[in-house]
Amino acid sequence: MTPDKRSDYWKANLRLLTILLIIWFVVSYGFGILLVEPLNAIQIGGYPLGFWFAQQGSIYTFLVLIFVYATSMNKLDQKFDVGED
Amino acid sequence: MTALEIWTYGVVGATFALYIGIAIWARAGTTGEFYVAGGGIHPVANGMATAADWMSAASFISMAGLIAFNGYGASVFLMGWTGGYVLLALLLAPYLRKFGKFTVPEFIGDRYYSQSARIVAVVCLILASITYVIGQMKGIGVAFSRFLEVPYEVGLYIGMGIVAIYAILGGMKGITYTQIAQYVVLICAYTVPAIFISLNLTGNPIPQLGLGGGYVEGGAATGMSLLDKLDQVVTELGFKEYTTQVMGSSLNMFVYTLSLMIGTAGLPHVIIRFFTVPKVRDARFSAGWALVFIALLYTTAPAVGAMARLNLMETIQIGPVGTEEGNLAYDERPNWFKKWEETGLLKFEDKNGDGRIQYYNDANPEFAAKAESFGWQGNEMVKVDRDIMVLANPEIAGLPAWVVALVVAGGLAAALSTAAGLLLAISSAISHDLLKGVIMPKISEKNELMAGRLAMLLAILAAGYLGMNPPGFAAGTVAIAFGLAASSIFPALMLGIFAKKVNNTGAIAGMVAGITVTLLYVFQHKGIFFVKGTEFLMPELGMGANWFLGISPNAFGAVGALVNFVVAILVAKVTAPPPEHIQHLVEDVRVPRGAGAATGH
């Protein structure tokens, strides 16, 4: 593999990481902690929304993030032909 | 013997027989099998084993209690102990799997081309893992002594014996398959009572939905949500509102969550689980599966906590606050109440001599004044240990004896599975990193395997001894284990992958600086090595309790990690860059192609 291609693959990976980690941060630290008070004014079911993000929503989002990462990286591996098989 | 005892002996005995059966079937014949289960574990199976490895006696027994009494504030544990898996999956696991060696210190030693770095990492790993394992040993002893009526020491010996059988015979291979079985036991034990309790209180069998559902009383909907009801019940007795009470301050919660996340991602006994899957791709998915299995318990826990709190309050405060009949008469207390009083974890003191129980927050001056006008003379529930919430839950909800027995087996499974994972991390650091890596590089594979088994035996004996004679620092387990992992191991690993130019001097300086800052802050609050009386807070110099931005010592790992990052990068900038072949190694780790099975060579 050429060094150029290698560095393109790495850049694409970093871009994906950055996007996913921003979501990770916003959902837990943003919605669950910093913005919890204003969000609590909204109710979903019997949950105040901020409280829901802190005790339920953030965990579900983490799950989605990891599977999106794993799937997208598989595609990147194929696109740059750096996968294991 | 009572029916409950027969059930408990039966269920616990059956699970132990299963673990021993697995041990005999899954023996390890090579160092590869002993350290990384031969590298052939399916990603879903590894996810399940990781979940059991990760969820300890603390997750199973203590977390719901923490949530019950801290309400929203306990979100730091829920987010912190799950969000770490995002960091692990995105920043560490796939790359460390590609590197393809047996232990965490081995990566640090190779990447930073330095035996000293490897030894620093071994020391951090052993310190973090030993403090963590003491808590598991105590959990095993307590579960036995409380439910099976055997002395604490005997319970501990039985626990040590079971772990010894499968961990010494099977190493990582035996541990992996027993952890899978233990996960099944512990998740059933956790969710079955939660389903019944949720059904009782909300009519919804799914606890995650029940927590956001409507409150049902005597079979009829009340038109009020469960959380509103809980907020109302606790605030009427002067406690903080459940859904909004914070832990310290928002900033403290922020930093605490971050410390737990970074610490989680840096715990070696979790990281090595990802060395057992066949491919880099599997490591990525396996982290996701681990979180699926963890989330099953972690999203149930908030419901268990809130519902247990409501049940407890409603058991004692049976009518309107302030009326005479509003409080339960002590003579009419339920059976579970009496049982937990015997253990000393629940204590009542009739301060105003009226024969009724008043449970309220007398530390709230406004409400205390009001309580006085009712003729109350202080909170009479002088002790409510938060660890009893999960254990007493099935009895509070009036569930049959087999459910109680299942909860005991679940608590034991959680403690045993985590203890085994930690012991493997410790013994592989000793036999592979210290013995083969530093002292006897020419040791044959057969002898290394023998050394691994011997190291495991020694680690089990040490853990047992410490469980029997818990040192003062056992109480600081959480602060130390997460603080060390966050401030030393995580930054070293992440920089090792993402910052090609960070060299040996930088990494070592960073790790030492990170640990030092974290330990100093913890010792300043809790005593040098947790010895009482050696705290050195200096309020006159502006260094009182939580002096640094109001951050509590348990939450300080993130600050230590930041110090580690900054020091490592700055020192690396002014010293010689890593040699060419190390920079190639980093580039190689970043690309999946060419990953073989994990090896020790």
Image (spheres, coloured by chain):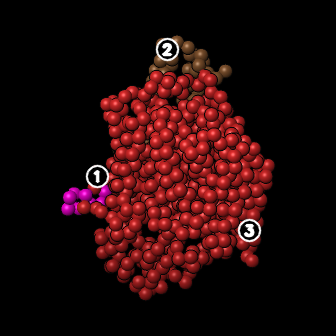
Chain colours: A brown, B red
Tell me the amino acid under the disc marked 2. Answer: Pro
Marks 1 & 3 on one chain: yes
Q: Chain of mark 3?
A: B
Disc number for residue A3: 2
Which region of the structure is painted magenta? B539-546
Q: CA distance from mark 1 to mark 3?
A: 50 Å
Answer with left or right where residue B161 lies relative to residue B60: right
Residue B372 in sight here = yes
The relative height of residue B524 versus residue B338 in the rendered view (above or below) is above
Chain under disc 1: B
Q: Nearer the viewer, mark 3 or mark 2?
A: 2
Q: Looking at the image, which residue sits at the far left?
A: B540
Label 2 element class: helix
Q: Nearer the viewer, residue B501 or B210?
A: B501
In the image shown, does B16 or B579 lie closer to the viewer?
B579
Tell me residue B585's x, y (percent).
Answer: 52, 26
The residue closer to the viewer here, B524 or B411, is B524
Query: Mark 1 belongs to which amino acid?
Result: Phe
In this view, B577 is above or below B521:
above
Mark 1–mark 3 contact, CB under 8 Å?
no
| Amino acid on which disc 3 is placed | Tyr
Q: Which residue is mark 3?
A: B9
The image shows residue A13 at horizontal and vertical percentages of 49, 24
Cα separation, mark 3 vs mark 2, equals: 63 Å
Mark 1 or 2, closer to the camera: 2
> Can you give x and y, in whole percent of width and height, for residue B506 in the image?
38, 36
Queried whether the magenta region covers residue A25, the answer comes back as no
**Residue B326 x, y percent position in the rendering:** 46, 76
Q: Chain of mark 2?
A: A
Above or below, B387 against B502 in this view is: below
In the image, farthest residue toward the bottom: B353
Q: Which mark is residue B548?
A: 1
